[in-house]
Amino acid sequence: MDGIINVLKQPGVTSHDIVNQVRKILKTKKVGHTGTLDPDAVGVLPLCIGKATRLAEYLSSAAKRYRALICFGYETDTQDGSGQVTKKTDLPIVLEDELLKVLESFIGELEQVPPMFSAVKINGQPLYKLAREGKEIARQSRIIEIYDLKLINYNQHSALIDVTCSKGTYIRTLCEEIGKALNSSAYMSFLLRVQSGVFHIDSSYTLDEIKQLEANKFLIKMADSLPDLQELDFSEDDIVKISHGNKVIFGTSSSSVLEGIKYKVLDKNKELLAVGILKDNYFKPVKVFR
């Protein structure tokens, strides 16, 4: 079984817990996720099955969309509702128009420091394990990007926001930073991942549904999971060469075909055969799925 499952993660379990449960349901060891969700978070968690595990790096780099609830007046050590309160401040005194201006200031590239309660590893040790021991160590900031940030609802105590962002963005850290920008404090009390790349919550499946349905109902073909990669056409002879990992000549004057970016090649059955790049008029497969 090879493909992707758009799982609807429930709260109270880790992403790895979901992976283990799907392994048992499908009776296969080759299952991997494309980016973790915190235990309390819910929503879209794409899982790669079989050969599709080799696509994880392409799927995890896609943009993500979240719905989050910011609660003002407190900070916690985990930056969400599961942690211990570490700071209490007055509630922000701003009107909705002022809040919108603050939110707009977060759109674009930002430097963000990963929280201590995260799966980021330093010297092979996950930060959350050090945090549970009461330790805090210096972390390097990372460049992330907020593509869009909308306000859904607001009162003095909380704000419901919709965020579209790059891989590696910590929404709970963003919520805390928004609180600081309002001269207050804040933590994230709820997080829903609405979309990850092409996978939307409207087409996701719970674990119970996956147990009950036939695989063809929930399993997404590998080729369909990469709609952003342009497809290149080759002769049958070249398809055979590509299936063995060999590069083949690809000459074109089309302005829509550029060197240095990734393309996909399908076999005669419209199944994903390879992902590769063009260089010096050759197509070179990077990954082959025979």
Image (spheres, rainbow, N blue to C red):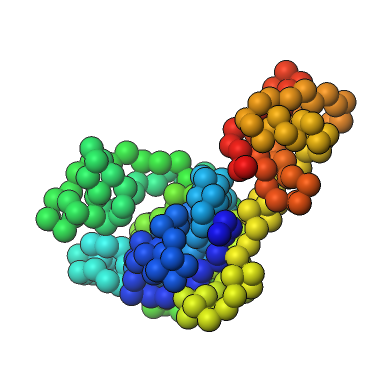
Quarter holding the N terminus is bottom right
The residue at the point 48 percent across, 54 percent down is: 34
Of all residues, the one furthest to the top in this rendering is 280
- 272 relative position to 193: left or right: right
The C terminus lies in which quarter of the figure? Answer: top right
Pick whichever, 38 or 249, lies toward us. 249
Relative to 136, does residue 99 appear above or below in the rendering?
Answer: below
Residue 89 horizontal/vertical position (percent): 26, 69
**Horizontal placement of 268 versus 131: left or right?**
right
Taking depth in this image into account, of 259 and 110 the one nearest to the observer is 259
Front position in the image: 237 or 166: 237
Task: Place residue 187 in its image quadrant.
Answer: bottom left
The residue sitting at 58% across, 58% down in the picture is: 3
The answer to whether residue 143 is visible is: yes
Where's residue 144, x and y in %? 48, 45
Residue most toward the right? 253
Residue 184 visible from this viewpoint: no
Please tell me in which quadrant of the rendered image residue 18 appears: bottom left
Q: Residue at x 72, y 41 (%)?
A: 265
Task: Where is residue 234? Give x, y as percent.
Answer: 81, 35
Q: x%, y% of residue 251?
A: 83, 24
Q: In this view, does 2 lie above or below 121?
A: below
